[in-house]
Amino acid sequence: MKKIIFLVLIIVSFSCKNETPTNGKLNIVTTTTMITDLVKNIGGDYVNVQGLMGSGVDPHLFKASEGDVTKLVNANVIFYNGLHLEGKLVEVFEKMGTATKTPIALGETLDKNTLIGSDYFASNYDPHVWFDINYFKQFSKKVAEVLSEKDPTNAEAYSKNLAAYLEKLTALENNVVGIVNELPRDQRILVTAHDAFNYFGKAYDFEVVGLQGLSTATEAGVQDVQKLSAFIIEKQIKAIFVESSVPKRTIEALQAAVKSKGHEVTIGGTLYSDALGNAGTVEGTYIGMFEYNVNTIVNALK
Amino acid sequence: MNSAQLEIQLIASLVAVACAIPGTFLVLRKMAMISDAISHSILPGIVVGFFITQDLNSPLLIVLAALTGVITVVLVEYIQKTGLVKEDTAIGLVFPVLFSIGVLMIAKRANDIHLDIDAVLVGELALAPFDRLIISGVDVGPKSLWIIGSILIITIILLIAFFKELKLSTFDKGLAASLGFSPVIIHYGLMTVSSVTTVGAFDAVGAILVVALMIAPSATAYLLTTDLKKMLLLSIIFGVFSAISGYWFAHWLDASIAGSITTMLGFLFLMVYLFAPSKGVIAVLYREKQQRTEVSLLTFLLHLKNHDEVQERHVNHLNEHINWQKVRSKTVLDLALKNNMIIIDNHIVSLTSKGDEFTTQAIDYIITNEDAQIEDMKDDFFLFRG
């Protein structure tokens, strides 16, 4: 008994080491890859940005690792999406605010009246707001504002980065509108695994139909598949889409259901929904991801 | 080490202790899977709580979850009492039904909001230090530390107050009933404590870890002792050891803390399973080998006793006559020599008086069908075991 306690003490005391990478810069922790990319664009070299989630991670089902504890302990500012996107993390972040640590729910800073609500519960909103570029611009402004406030010496650099990034986003928007306009209005129907693209649909006049509902944990019902396959045949939809953070098989089941009724629908490609592509690739940035998604959708439906 | 890391280890250790106590009784009563069942059956409680409050963060959801846990236990007990199905079957009948009711309620009423067990109950040990309890502006530590601490204190008080009753109703229900306290009440009490501990610990550390911490340390301890007090103590030690070593394993890997602790629990069980002094696999294998040699020895001695003729007792003839392989006959011969049961004179083997006495007694026991006595006799006669 005594020996074991002694052993435990040895393990604990040997493992004590301090790790605080500060070098005078603000330590920023972000959740989704979209927000990580955004903060890197605004903060540049003046901040340390550490993202909790990698590419292909479903933010709702994210599990923290031991290293994330230290990241969060050392964070000065935490930027997250909010609106219940990050599941239990949101609840934790909300209570994390101290004198030296500021959690910012970017989604909560948006005008709630413009958000898409849930049919059943008025207090809950669709959290996938980054698919509307205007909301993402508001995110950018908020990030620049918070960074300037926390680190006034570099405020000028932040506002310069913000201006440059907003310009890029505007260019992206024009580009997207151009691509989408190649597609006649009656062909703009987007069928995906879960309802992540409602804001995208609202912005660019797409009818969005999700198979699974908002929560990625619930499974699609048999009726959902049947109804949706009838809908696909009726509207003569050419392609349906897989998402990077949701398993393929529900969409494949839908394709099989359509086939069994004697019609053909292709899988138009994989869309990035809750996370960006791998870091270092074009789809690893918000702008690259958005262009990729739009191109994939339009090319498959044309 | 920063304070968050220290707090995580403290919370994990307290959860380990709080789980080990009811876990020991659950393992002894063959109801270990009840904690796993509770982890699923609480879903309808959460959904109903959400319908009432429309708030995912309301404490009512956790209260209702604990209540559903108790309902699970009552239903399991009720089905089991009919005597038509076994304990594990009763558990397997109840929790999928309750879980499915929860799934159906979500599908019918709340399909477009993020609502599942994960959203409400499945805590992350890594995030526990960031959810602080603030009393009138003063930070008094992580909330889950207080929740688990309170559950632990209540569990320990109940354990000390009802230890005798728990022990008796676990091992001898009939005697417990005849002594005047109802094993059913003790049973429900234990199950309620397990349910509350499970739900409380879920909120702090997550589901798999709770199930693992309830079962693995107690199962490991059960391999080492049959004394209830020692088993409780060992379960607690194993649980806490896994919690702390698992944490540093996660630190080294930068991986999930709960996953690493569970891995440590599994590893610890494997080690004890292999190397436990009496029930361990290696000890059992060794004992079987010893037994085989000693049975051979006895056969050999009986052969010597039955044959006076010289050619039957020649060393080289042993292989042919008793049909042994050379290696084995040498082992047996050496063992007999070391124990002074035979002498070898010019390649002829004879029994000594000690060997003769041993063989006579052994025959007596075999004839009277008291084979077990031979084991005691071996202790008297053998200087060296096989």
Image (spheres, coloured by chain):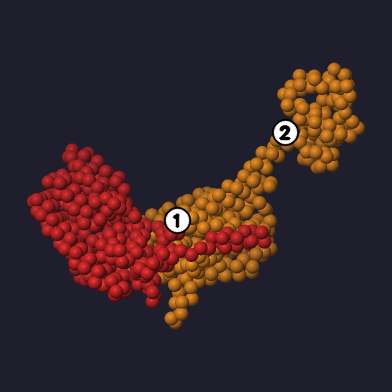
Instruction: Confirm or deny contact between disc 1 and disc 2 (CB under 8 A).
Output: no
Q: In this figure, which residue is indicated by the disc labeled 2? A: B292
Nearer-the-camera pick, A166 or B373: A166
Q: Residues within 10 Å of mark 1 (few under 14, many from 20)?
A: some
Quarter of the image for residue B341 reads: top right
Query: Which amino acid type is marked by label 1?
Result: Asp
Question: Percent x, y for residue B186?
Answer: 59, 63
Q: Is residue A212 visible?
A: no
- What chain is the orange one? B
Q: Is residue B139 visible?
A: yes
| Disc 2, SS | helix
Identify the residue at image location x=67%, y=53%: B225
Above/below status of A253 relative to A107: above
**Residue positioned most to the top:** B311
Question: Percent x, y for residue A20?
Answer: 43, 65
- What chain is the red one? A
Q: As drawn, is B303 to the left or to the right of A238?
A: right
Query: Which amino acid type is marked by label 2?
Result: Arg
